[in-house]
Amino acid sequence: MESKSSDVAVINESICLNQVIGEETNQISLDEETSLSNSLEKIIYVEIIVPQHKIEVNVLNDKVSIEGKLTRIVYGISLEGEFAEEVLPEQHFSHFIHLQGIKPTDSALVDVNVGDYKGRLKGNDVLQEEVNLDIFVKVTAAKSVDVFKDIGEDINQTKELTRLQNLVEQKELEVPAEVDVGFEQKVLEIIETETKVIPQSFKVADNKGEIEATILYRIAYKTEDDKISEVKGREEFNKKLDLSNVDSSMEMWADLKVTQVENQLNDTKLQVTQTITINCNVKVFEISQMELVTEAEGVDTYDDQHTIENVVCQERESIKSQQSAEFSISVDKIERITTNCKIKENKVLDDKVSLNLSVIHLVHYKDEDGKKHLLKVTGEEVNHFIYIAGVTEDMKALVKTDISDVKIELTPDSMAATISCHVNVLAKILHNEQLALVTDVNVLKDKNHDASVIIYSVQDGDTLFKIAKRFGVRQKRIISTNKEYIKDPSHLEIGQKIIIPCN
């Protein structure tokens, strides 16, 4: 777009920025006392699941509302010395994160993870718990601004080459997916479902987009003999999207979240069909280098500071983990293994991401008498580096993990085993870039006023630049005319009287 006056030729262009309105990391503590169905002598382990599809996020004025539910499975030893497991009632949590200036039309990225946990028996039939949840929220909004390439041949101006991510298309849609899951034993009741989606790649072509991802599912269920078991697996997911005004030279990113899961058992009770709804928040960017005006002499410019979210990259790595396990009694049969990975810390350093993680295996087995047992195997904390050229300490990594290829090899005497698996890590690197832009220019034009001065009353939203541009005068003239009244040019009070020199 080009606009001209008699004095100055202005060349400007309108772009759309993915602006960061605010971000915050909070930790909340949940204290709970829960009565157990069966009395326990001791607790071996409490497994906590945060189902993604049970987290509800609402962006309100100046705050984000987050609600969700935790599923807890207690493994322990009964008073009779038998292995016992119990699924507790869902634990509800809600939290507000306050971020000034955000609005319901903004977009929120929310990440909820289980932090520290403390659990103990109160007597034999009450579980007393303290669960810490780490919650990260980032709120962004699309904002259109004008940037200036030139403001006239006769103007002494400074220009800088600036990298811009122009937000060309933003689309939020609900995408269906379906997964068929088989069971070895007949299912009496589905207790809990944990389903999440891990993005793999994003592609963009002429007015088309494509998302490739992996759906990870885990279903805890009760068998007809009233025992708890589980099945888990993965399914590849591919979705093509209709977009507008995009081409293969652009970049596409998407935040994916499972928002709904429905389970339908078939007549044999040996298979369930999962109907999944995936929320896709898609953004397509045009990456360009522009030479933009940053300073000018002889005209007023409005300089604006913007915090822009840049998705730097998305890196994947598979880490092999191997641990030894020792049993107190000879193992007759391994029934199942549940494996979790806990990321205790992640930091972005120069050219790498540092991870501190530990892998926990829950080995369910039977002895020669058919008695059930559980062995918790906790590996040593591992420090691992993912090397990514160009990343710096001021960036942030959102890290997700999933487990694959879990194998257990018993020793000949069945008193020990080696457990191996792969921890698949997805690290999404984000950078909040501070961008200083000239977003308006006060081009002086001849304006006929009947009076030599105008007494103006400051309105809500006024700035000195806006007032000067409205009346076609320089800011310096207004300041010099109002030396007694304008103490701080950057802070005007509503209703304040200002003298506007007209000639």
Image (tube, rainbow, N blue to C red):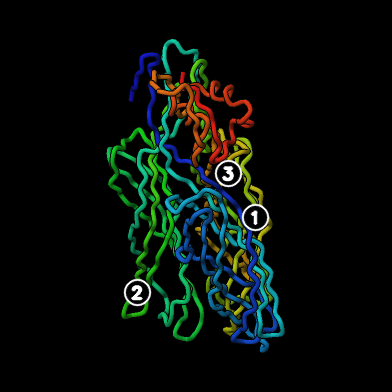
Sequence order check: which comes first, mark 1 or mark 3? 1
Which residue carries the number 1 mark? 344
Mark number displayed over residue 264: 2
Rendered residue at 30%/49% (across/down): 240
Name the residue: 66% across, 52% down.
Answer: 382
* Separation (CA) of disc 2 from disc 3: 40 Å
State left or right for residue 353 relative to residue 172: right
How many labels sit on residues? 3
Residue 483 found in image quarter:
top right
Is residue 431 visible to the viewer in this orientation of the structure?
no
Graded by Cα atoms within 10 Å as few (under 14), some (14 to 19) or many (20 or more), the crowding at tag 2 reads few
Mark 2–mark 1 Cα distance, whole angstroms, equals 36 Å
Which of the pair 354/468 is nearer the observer?
468
What amino acid does circle 3 point to? Answer: Lys
Q: Position of residue 100 (x, y in %)?
A: 55, 49
Mark 1 vs mark 3, CA separation in Å: 15 Å
> In this figure, which residue is indicated by the disc labeled 3?
396
Inspect the image, locate mark 1, and give the three-letter code of the amino acid beneath it. Lys
Q: Secondary structure at mark 3?
A: strand
- Side (left or right) of 148 relative to 48: left
**Residue at the far front in the pictured view:** 451
Q: Residues within 10 Å of mark 1 (few under 14, many from 20)?
A: some
